[in-house]
Amino acid sequence: MDKKRIVAALGRNAFGTLFPDQKKAVAKAACAIADLVEEKYQIAITFSNGPQVGMLHTAMTEFARLSPEYTVAPMSVCGALSQGYIGYDLQNAIRTELLNRGIFKPVSTIITQVRVDPFDEAFSEPTKVIGRYMSEDEARGETAKGNYVVKEEKGYRRIVAAPKPIDIYEIDAIQALLDADQLVIAAGGGGIPVLQQGTRLKGASAVIEKDLTAARMADMVDADILLFLTGTEKAAIHYQQPGETFLDRLSAQEARTYMEQNQFEAGSMLPKIEAAVEFVSSKPGRKAVITHLSRAKEAMAGKTGTLITAQ
């Protein structure tokens, strides 16, 4: 019988901003993935990179400020750097965990480019705050270059667009590795957003919501299950309020109703629910699961987590 195929999206709790913290965190993520390998799933992994890409952007900007002969690294380059170093830590942690369990399975990281629409309205209404705090003069300089800035209590910061993913350029390589029953890490941080210009791909000054890219990748590799491994065991309505209710199961229509009621927090649970609904509605029989990183195996056995289905 064919193995069931999972796309597992790791939330920010699977990583750390500081390098030593990240080494410890990815070891826990590796345990969760190894548990699923032992259950004979085919697995593609994607991950959050919000703190890391912000750290890289801040570091590269500060370096260019201190050394004017160097240019500031664009967001697309910072995204690629974060994919590489997070993937490096994650694939090595998974490899070690698997070998410690007597399992040999190749693990690969693919630097992944994701196509976005240059006319996506997100480019005129940026929402993602990134990088270090700037002075007013520095903020004016960014505005003069055509970048958006926002004023916060501590100063000014860059704000970039969050367009929707359209296509994944490395999908054939991802598919080939899955078909060979290998573990593949791809589309980290939602992928590097690129604009197609003839035969050339140009990096966009943007970040893509990684949960939406996870759903897109799951659809394109024809996964059976989209698994969100996050910091909470189940999704909830009236979260941290009177009447808080944790959800064992949701249909796509129930999820849409709750989204209309603003039951899910933007930037946290909302994109997971949106991505889950998109995925399960795209083909009969598909499922999405949301659960805590440490409960992946139990959630796949139906013992915990929130299960989202089309009906």
Image: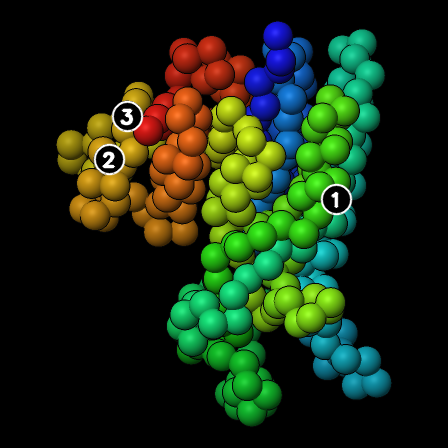
Q: Is residue 306 above or below residue 194?
A: above
Residue under the point 67% across and 52% down? 169
Q: Residue 253 carries which label?
A: 2
Percent position (x, y) of residue 51? 58, 54
Percent position (x, y) of residue 19? 72, 45
Does residue 102 appear to the left or right of 170 in the view shown? right
Query: Could you tell which of marks 1 and 2 lies nearer the N-terminus?
Result: 1
- The Cα atoms of the two marked residues, 1 and 2, are separated by 35 Å
Residue under the point 51% across and 24% down? 224
Color scheme of the displayed model: rainbow
User: How packed is label 3: few (under 14 Cα within 10 Å), some, or many (20 or more)?
Assistant: few
Q: Quadrant of the N terminus?
A: top right
User: How packed is label 1: few (under 14 Cα within 10 Å), some, or many (20 or more)?
Assistant: some
Does residue 155 appear to the left or right of 103 in the view shown? left
Residue under the point 53% across and 15% down? 297
Residue 126 showing in the rendered view: no
Query: Could you tell which of marks 3 and 2 lies nearer the N-terminus?
Result: 2
Residue extending farthest to the front is 198
Q: Is residue 247 above or below residue 273?
A: above
**Residue placed most toward the observer, 160 or 187:** 187
Residue that mark 3 sits on: 311
Name the amino acid, label 3: Gln
Percent position (x, y) of residue 206? 56, 66
- Mark 1 against mark 2, which lies toward the viewer? 2
- The Cα atoms of the two marked residues, 3 and 2, are separated by 8 Å
Q: Are marks 1 and 3 in contact (CB under 8 Å)?
A: no
